Image (cartoon, grey):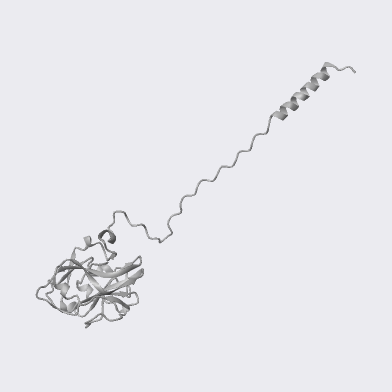
Amino acid sequence: MRITRTAVGLVAATAAAALLAGCTAPAEKAKPTAPPATTQAPPAQGAPAAPSDTEPRPQDQNLLAWTGDPNDAGHVTAQSAAGVGGRVTLVRIVLRERITWSNIWLGLAGIDPQASLSDCYLGVYDASGTLRAATADISPQLMTDPVAKPLALAKPFTAEPGTYFIALLLNGTWATNGLTLKATGAGISVNAGLTPPSLRYSTVLTGQTSLPATVNLKDQSTSTINTGWASQWYAIS
């Protein structure tokens, strides 16, 4: 059989096309890129902010808690025996962690050498108004050394996180401007936005010679507070 040049060319062209098709692979599909990393979720609404590294903390001074930085307790508060004698004065403090509460620190600013004191106490009430612990009579400590001083509870107790009220009871006679205490606020403004039984600073009862086992926090009063009996500075150790 006679093969023409045209047929030979056709066969060669077909073979070349087949070879080219076999050597050329389809382009690889691009792999999907990973989604961008998500940013960290912001803190839940209402979560407490981390304290500033420069903000003073009780632990900086070997304390467990306080009603305020003692560096800010520049005010001095004084009240007559007729004004606060026999009244239970309450200062609220909120604990954020579990502690063993052994002492209440009081900022004694001035003493009256001629005072006659008796039945003076510090104590701790919980949010239900139950007395958790109290000191012995602190009258002798109120007659000496006008400094910040720890006053021991008769029996330390474990305080769970929550709201507590430090109670002060004074009895006796003294010069109004002689027996003075360091304070963190000017009485009236301390209770802004608050009502009983959650007042930050208040008094309850009259005629007391010892801290009662319970107090009704709904009876918190500001009548004495409003006369200038400013909120005392306290700390815990």
Q: Nearer the viewer, residue 172 or 158?
A: 158
Residue farthest toward the right in the current orientation of the protein: 1
Query: In the rendered image, which quarter is residue 207 located in?
Result: bottom left
Q: Residue placed at 10% from the left, 73% from the top?
A: 113
Expressed as whole percent of the image width and height from the top left, the position of residue 65 reads 29, 65
Expressed as whole percent of the image width and height from the top left, the position of residue 91 reads 27, 71
The quarter of the picture where the C terminus appears is bottom left
Query: In the rendered image, which quarter is residue 170 located in?
Result: bottom left
In the picture, measured across the screen, residue 227 lies left or right of residue 130, that is left
In the picture, measured across the screen, residue 162 lies left or right of residue 174, that is right
Expressed as whole percent of the image width and height from the top left, the position of residue 139 reads 17, 76
Q: Residue placed at 60% from the left, 40% from the top?
A: 31
Q: Residue placed at 83% from the left, 20% from the top?
A: 7
The quarter of the picture where the N terminus appears is top right
Residue farthest toward the front in the current orientation of the protein: 155
| Vertical side of 204 occupied by 108: above or below | above
In the picture, measured across the screen, residue 90 lies left or right of residue 6, that is left
Expressed as whole percent of the image width and height from the top left, the position of residue 206 reads 23, 82
Query: What is the count of numbered marks?
Result: 0
| Vertical side of 55 occupied by 206: above or below | below
| Vertical side of 8 occupied by 144: above or below | below
